[in-house]
Each structure stands twice: as C-alpha cells, then as structure tokens.
Amino acid sequence: MAEQSLTDLHLDVYDTREGPWSPEHGEIEIPDDWAFLPSGDAFVTRTVKAAGPYWLAWRPRGRNRPHRRLAGVWAPAETIAQAQAAAAETAERRARQREQGARQRARSEDRYRAELAAAILAYLDFDAAHADLADQIANGAAGHAAIVGSGRVGRTRKLSLEDRAALAARAWIRHRFTDYEDRLNGLYGDDLLLDELDYRDIKHNAHSAVDAFLTEHRPRG
C-alpha cells in the first residue's frame, strides 16, 4: 500500500528502536508535512481528530511498563497548528463554560442531597422531641451517601429515592449509634469460616440494633 494512502487511515503507531511501526503495515515513515501532538490538551486533540486523518502514537509495553501508553497523535502539521490557534482563541470562553458547568453540577448536587435528606427524614419519622437528632442523621447520611464517584447507595439510580434513603439512614445509624464498628475492629483470627460466621452475627445484631434505635426515637403508639 502506498504511503499516501496510509495517511487516510487511523493507524496505531509505535515508537520503536527501528523507528515508527504499525501492527498492520510494519515499519512506516511519518509524512514530511505531519507533526507530533503530545497528549495533554483534550480540546486540541479532539479538534485534530475531527479535522481528518491522524495516527495514534503509542509507547509500547516494556520491562517497567506492563501496558502500552498513548503518547499523542501524528497528524498534518497544519491541522495541529489550526487546532492550537482555535484553542487559544476560545480558551477564555471554554474556561467560562467549564466554570458555568461546574456551578450547575454543584447546584444539581445540592438539590439532590436536599431531596435525599428529606427522604431520610421521612423514613426516620422521629418523634418531635428528637427533631434535632433526625436532622443530624438526615444531613450526615445524605452527604455521605451522595458523594460523587463514591459508588455508595446514594449514587445508584437502580433504587427508588425512598429505598436509597432507608439504606443510607440505616448505614449511618449502624456505624454511629451501635457497636457495629467496635465489634468489627475486634474481629480477627486465622479461621476464615469462623470469621465469616462472626461477621454474619455482627451484621445481624447491628440490624436489630438499628431497628431498636428507630423504634426508640419514633412516636410511641
């Protein structure tokens, strides 16, 4: 295949001792009018890729590098220059957009934490005499369970808001108002089966302790 036709393909190119190498085409040459754009500026890289031909530049695996690493892209020098000029021209606008997006996400997260806290309050259903404690649990549990990227129950959309609230509240109470953590910290031993049985017993007792805590603070019939 002629070199000119290779420039129409999106190749994986590796930097080797012998020079650029592609798994599909072996040793290749970088076109004279192409340049290397290192990874780092996502806007410039996206713009270059959207503009036309490019090759992905990889650092191969090595003794101290078990996985290949994307180093950047090879593309026409003019395309890279135009993308960099566009980045400079739009830098201020894109910074404002990022700030606006961050504020919008923060407001959205604040609304969600408030919704989750309200649902936790409804689940707790504490007597008016324990309103301050209910607020403390609701705000603490909502803030903990809804941390972005935590993978905690507050981030799942597979459960209803009410179910998320119940699980978040029970977990908060279990860790802060029962002896669950103390008993876990005391769990040790070489017998894994025994430890598993002990753990199940601790979990069962904690579940009962949470139920008792809720009953104690809810209105008495």
Image: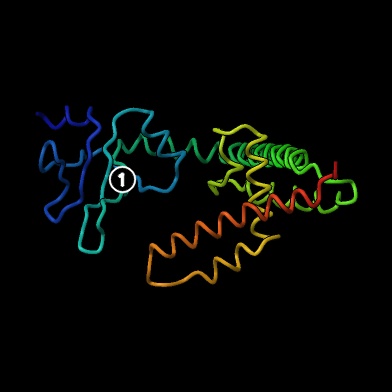
Q: Secondary structure at mark 1?
A: strand
**10 Å crowding of disc 1: few (<14), some (14-19), many (20+):** some
The location of residue 160, given as percent across then percent down, is 62, 32
Quarter of image, res 78: top left
Residue at the spot 75% in from the left edge and 52% down from the top edge: 137
Is 65 placed above or below 214 here? below
Quarter of image, res 205: bottom right
Q: In the depicted view, which residue is nearer to us: 162 or 194? A: 194
Residue at the spot 20% in from the left edge and 63% down from the top edge: 63
The amino acid type found where label 1 is placed reads Phe
Q: In the depicted view, which residue is nearer to us: 99 or 131? A: 131
Residue at the spot 80% in from the left edge and 49% down from the top edge: 134
The location of residue 217, given as percent across then percent down, is 81, 50
The location of residue 103, given as percent across then percent down, is 68, 40
Which residue is outermost to the right? Answer: 129
Q: Is residue 135 left or right of residue 95?
A: right
Q: Is residue 98 left or right of residue 86?
A: right
Point out the image quarter for the C terminus.
top right
Q: In the depicted view, which residue is nearer to us: 66 or 112? A: 112
Q: Is residue 149 left or right of residue 133?
A: left
Is 70 placed above or below 3 here? below
Residue at the spot 49% in from the left edge and 63% down from the top edge: 198
Quarter of image, res 8: top left
The location of residue 44, given as percent across then percent down, is 43, 39
Q: Which residue is mark 1?
A: 36
